[in-house]
Image (spheres, rainbow, N blue to C red):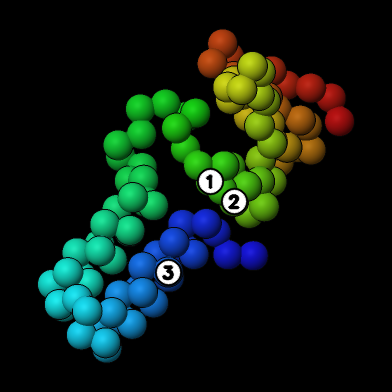
Amino acid sequence: MRSTAALKIEEAVTVGLTCLEQGLDSKATVKENILRAVSMNCLPIREVKSVEELPVEVFELFHRQLGLGFEVQAGKVVGVNFTDPEGKLVTATLSGVERGEN
C-alpha cells in the first residue's frame, strides 16, 4: 500500500499535468503546486526536535529492517528493545540500559 504522502504528491502531479495539457495553468503554477505538495508531505529529519515528531513509518522501517521494538507509554516513545549478539533482550531507555535473559 502506498503512503498517504505519496498519494497526495501523485495527485498533485496528475492534476498539474492535466491542467497544463488543458491550458488551465502555467508551467510555473504547476511546478509551484507540486513543490508545495512535496514540502507539505515531507519532514526533514534535521528539523525534528523530539522522537514523537517522527512519522510512524520511520518506526515501522526500523522494526522491519533492524528488528527494533519500541516501548511506548502515554503515546511517547520511552525506549527501544533489541537482541544483542549474545541473544539477550536489551532495552535502552532515557534512564539507562537494562539487559534481560533470553
Report the front residue among 62 and 34.
34
Residue 92 visible in this rendered orientation of the protein: no
Q: Is 12 situated left or right of 30 in this image?
A: right
Q: Mark 1 points at which residue?
A: 58
Residue placed at 63% from the left, 54% from the top?
65
User: Which percent across, then down, holds residue 64?
Assistant: 67, 52
The quadrant in which residue 69 appears is: top right
Residue placed at 24% from the left, 82% from the top?
20
Residue placed at 64% from the left, 16% from the top?
74
What number is the disc on residue 61?
Answer: 2
Sequence-wise, which precedes: disc 3 or disc 1? 3
Residue 39 visible in this rendered orientation of the protein: yes
Element type where label 2 sits in the image:
helix
Dots 3 and 2: beta carbons under 8 Å? no
Dots 3 and 1: beta carbons under 8 Å? no
User: Which percent across, then down, holds residue 86?
Assistant: 76, 37
Q: Mark 3 points at which residue?
A: 11
How far apart in space, not on screen, are marks 2 and 1 (Cα)? 5 Å
How far apart in space, not on screen, are marks 3 and 1 (Cα)? 23 Å
**The disc labelled 2 sits on which kind of residue?**
Leu
Looking at the image, is 67 positioned above or below residue 82? Answer: below
What number is the disc on residue 34?
Answer: none
User: Which percent across, then down, holds residue 92?
Assistant: 61, 23
Sequence-wise, which precedes: disc 3 or disc 2? 3
User: Which percent across, then down, holds residue 51?
Assistant: 47, 29
Front: mark 3 or 1: 3
Dots 2 and 1: beta carbons under 8 Å? yes
Looking at the image, is 41 positioned above or below residue 55? Answer: below
Q: Is 87 situated left or right of 78 in this image?
A: right
Q: Residue lying at the far right in this picture: please name it.
A: 102
